[in-house]
Image (cartoon, grey):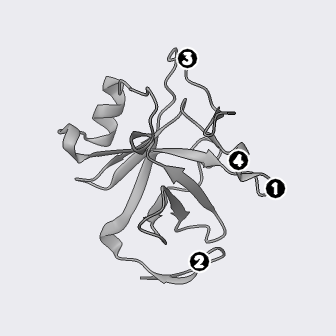
Amino acid sequence: MKLNTLRFGEIEIEENRIFEFVMPIIGFNHLSKFVILEPNKEALFKWLQSIEDPALAFPIISVAALDYDYTIDIPDNVVEVLGITAVESLLVMNITSIPQEDPKGTTINLLAPLIFNLDNQKAGQVVLSGSGYDISYPMFKEV
């Protein structure tokens, strides 16, 4: 399928790469279909592009690629809703906020990761209540 996006122009998307957010992204309950885009395979950042709103794309990152002490326990109800049967089929990403005027001020939402089930293309944003993680954790520490 072809999608005309604001950020990336017209792109071709394979239907089997579209994730259905059965647990919506907070504040975007009306949107459920997204695709992960990797415009630059070498970059840490990827983009979560909405299929239903071509103007909406979130910069996302895998915290596993960074040197952070970050572990999550996925609640049983999330395992059930997303149909998770194997940890190997999971992809955990976090939404980032990159200030245009100061990219060094980039923050990562560690409190509410995005959980993707690669086996069935279901996904959801999960709030890790009581985890102590921050919604806007600084990506770059001051030297």
Spot occupied by residue 32 in the image (x, y as percentages of width and height) = 50, 56
| Residue holding disc 1 | 101
Residue found 35% across the figure and 23% down from its top: 73
Q: Amino acid at mark 1?
A: Glu
Mark nearer the viewer, 4 or 3: 4
Task: Give the Cα separation between the discs numbered 4 and 2.
Answer: 23 Å
Which residue extends farthest right?
A: 101
Contact between marks 4 and 2 (CB within 8 A): the answer is no
- SS at mark 1? loop
> Few, some or many C-alpha atoms within 10 Å of disc 1 (few <14, some 14-19, many ≥20)?
few
Which amino acid, by three-letter code, is at mark 4?
A: Lys
Q: Residues within 10 Å of mark 3 (few under 14, many from 20)?
A: few
Dot 4 or dot 2: first in sequence order is: 2
State which tag comes first along the sequence, 3 or 1: 1
**Pointers 1 and 4 in contact (C-beta within 8 Å):** no
Q: Nearer the viewer, mark 1 or mark 2?
A: 1
Q: Residue at x 77, y 57 (%)?
A: 100
Instruction: Tell me the CA gap for discs 4 and 3.
Output: 23 Å
Give the mark, 1 or 2, whose residue is nearer the N terminus: 2
State yes or no: discs 1 and 2 in contact (Cβ < 8 Å). no
| Three-letter amino acid code at the position of disc 3 | Gly
The residue that mark 4 highlights is 104
Quarter of the image with the C terminus is top right
Please name the residue that numbered disc 3 is placed on.
132
